[in-house]
């Protein structure tokens, strides 16, 4: 994994990040997890783990525990095609006929139109003919089947899974001619929910108020028909910037312009996101953006009076971290150190944007943090409040640091309302509130919504 520890400006230098043999990883989520999130929450795509059951159990538990109830995921099948040691040694990867029959029945029950095979690392290392396996499954079931050769282990970059999944979804539609309309796709939402109290609902509601049509949400809760329908949109906007990749650049060249390349966090980031979409679609909605921001301004300023100058540590993926830096900079907080879980190809440009256009400063920047890095930060810096991944609560408890989870939550952290919500959470944490009843149960708070006076929007 690429590693960097140093000043934020140094991260922008060419080849600043170096390959590190040691990584005390605490995320344990790799490219396969990222791809599975893209596919498993779709309506008519069936994902198959090819390899050990244990890998499937881990991935399934992680996704279901996160979103089964909170984000309306419900029960989703995750079939496993497992091979015995003898089969692997002999190179016999022919799917058993009884497994093929069960698979065909499952496809009928769930209305699957595409099957995606995700091989575990053991299958990749032994040189299994995955294309051949996919061909046999497709021949028996009559359903398009393909294998994505992406790693299951967490040490390779998680971004590779998002990139491969998006490319696989859009491959059948690339290079074709589509008429583009003044609408936007929201890319990077991984759950079936469209609930107003969730981040996707917040984004949809902001655009609805500005009378900007949403064409499709990619990919959670969508179908393959929605993917094809999304080819008619005039713009793609990211609600999770971690999925930023080559596919979105390719779609930009084919007429679906890339707008809102960074998720709408903070007042500054939300205004950038909405303005970028409006600019690309040539829709004069700037007065509406002003009015929307104004409704939350007093609540934001009240929080800012109490948060300005407070010392903070923050961590997140390549999308969420940039967004949180927007929010913390807007509140005038003193960022001691920041950590990015893993990079994508645009991470340096995103950091450059935050330094150049938003004056973000910090004492230390860490790429690919490990548990050892968290302990050092907790000991080395005077931190008033800590925003980080759910697992980081243990470091905070050991050192008595107020903690706000940024990977497991339900109320929006995006939009103007999300900036207020995060400010409220920071203040609550510093007053002694715990967002975790236990390591398994979160204690979420109520979100803030200041509705528009125009009930017709």
Image: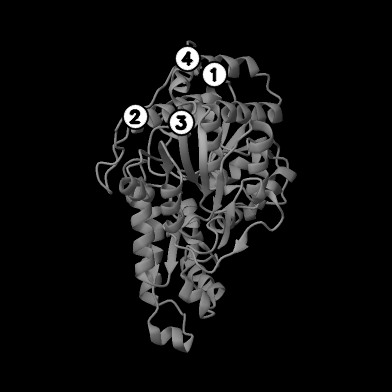
SS at circle 1: helix
The tally of labels here is 4
Task: Quote the CA–CA distance across marks 1 and 2.
Answer: 23 Å
- Residues 442 and 218: in front is 442
* Residue position marked by numbered label 3 in the rendering: 310
Residue at image position (65%, 18%) is 286
SS at circle 3: loop
* Residue position marked by numbered label 1 in the rendering: 293
Q: Residues within 10 Å of mark 2 (few under 14, many from 20)?
A: some
- Residues 342 and 284: in front is 342
- Residues 283 and 122: in front is 122
Task: Quote the CA–CA distance across marks 3 and 1.
Answer: 24 Å
Depicted 301 relative to depicted 40: above or below? above
Residue at image position (49%, 55%) is 369
N-terminal-most mark, 4 or 3? 4
Looking at the rendering, which quadrant does residue 283 occupy?
top right
Closer to us: mark 4 or mark 3? 3
* Residue position marked by numbered label 4 in the rendering: 298
SS at circle 4: helix
Q: Residues within 10 Å of mark 3 (few under 14, many from 20)?
A: some
Disc 3 to disc 2: CB gap under 8 Å: no
Q: Which mark is residue 428?
A: 2
Residue lying farthest to the left in this orientation: 437
Depicted 284 relative to depicted 274: above or below? above
Left-right relation of 89 to 291:
left
Disc 4 to disc 1: CB gap under 8 Å: no
N-terminal-most mark, 1 or 2? 1
Depicted 288 relative to depicted 25: above or below? above
N-terminal-most mark, 3 or 2? 3
SS at circle 2: helix
């Amino acid at each position: 994994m690429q590693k960097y520890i140093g000043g934020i400006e140094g991260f922008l230098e060419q080849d600043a990040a170096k390959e590190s043999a040691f990584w005390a990883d605490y995320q344990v989520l790799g490219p396969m997890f990222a791809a599975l999130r893209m596919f498993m929450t779709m309506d008519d795509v069936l994902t198959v783990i090819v390899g050990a059951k244990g890998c499937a159990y881990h991935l399934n538990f992680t996704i279901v525990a996160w979103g089964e109830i909170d984000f309306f995921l419900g029960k989703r099948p995750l079939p496993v095609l497992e091979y015995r040691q003898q089969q692997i040694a002999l190179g016999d990867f022919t799917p058993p006929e009884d497994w093929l029959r069960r698979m065909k029945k499952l496809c009928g029950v769930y209305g699957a139109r595409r099957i995606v095979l995700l091989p575990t690392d053991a299958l990749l290392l032994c040189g299994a003919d995955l294309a051949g396996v996919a061909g046999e499954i497709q021949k028996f079931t009559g359903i398009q089947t393909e294998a994505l050769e992406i790693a299951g282990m967490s040490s390779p970059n998680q971004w590779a899974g998002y990139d491969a999944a998006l490319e696989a979804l859009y491959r059948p539609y690339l290079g074709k001619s589509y008429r583009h309309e003044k609408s936007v796709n929201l890319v990077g939402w991984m759950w079936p929910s469209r609930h107003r109290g969730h981040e996707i609902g917040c984004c949809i509601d902001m655009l609805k108020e500005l009378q900007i049509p949403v064409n499709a949400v990619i990919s959670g809760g969508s179908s393959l028909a929605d993917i094809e329908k999304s080819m008619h949109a005039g713009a793609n906007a990211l609600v999770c910037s971690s999925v930023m990749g080559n596919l979105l650049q390719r779609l930009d060249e084919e007429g679906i312009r890339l707008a809102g390349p960074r998720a709408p966090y903070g007042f500054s980031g939300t205004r950038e996101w909405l303005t970028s979409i409006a600019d690309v679609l040539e829709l004069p909605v700037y007065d509406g953006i002003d009015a929307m921001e104004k409704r939350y301004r007093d609540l934001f300023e009240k929080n800012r009076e109490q948060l300005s100058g407070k010392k903070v540590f923050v961590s997140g993926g390549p999308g969420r971290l940039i967004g949180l830096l927007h929010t913390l900079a807007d509140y005038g907080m003193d960022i001691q150190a920041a950590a990015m879980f893993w990079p994508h190809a645009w991470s340096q440009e995103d950091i450059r944007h935050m330094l150049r256009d938003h004056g973000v400063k910090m004492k230390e920047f860490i790429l690919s943090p490990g548990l050892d890095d968290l302990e050092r930060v907790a000991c080395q810096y005077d931190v008033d409040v800590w925003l980080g991944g759910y697992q980081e609560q243990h470091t905070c408890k050991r050192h008595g640091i107020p903690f706000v989870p940024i990977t497991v939550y339900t109320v929006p952290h995006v939009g103007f309302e999300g900036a207020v919500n995060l400010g409220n959470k920071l203040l609550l944490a510093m007053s002694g509130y715990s967002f975790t009843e236990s390591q398994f149960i979160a204690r979420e708070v109520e979100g803030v919504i200041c509705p528009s006076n125009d009930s017709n929007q």
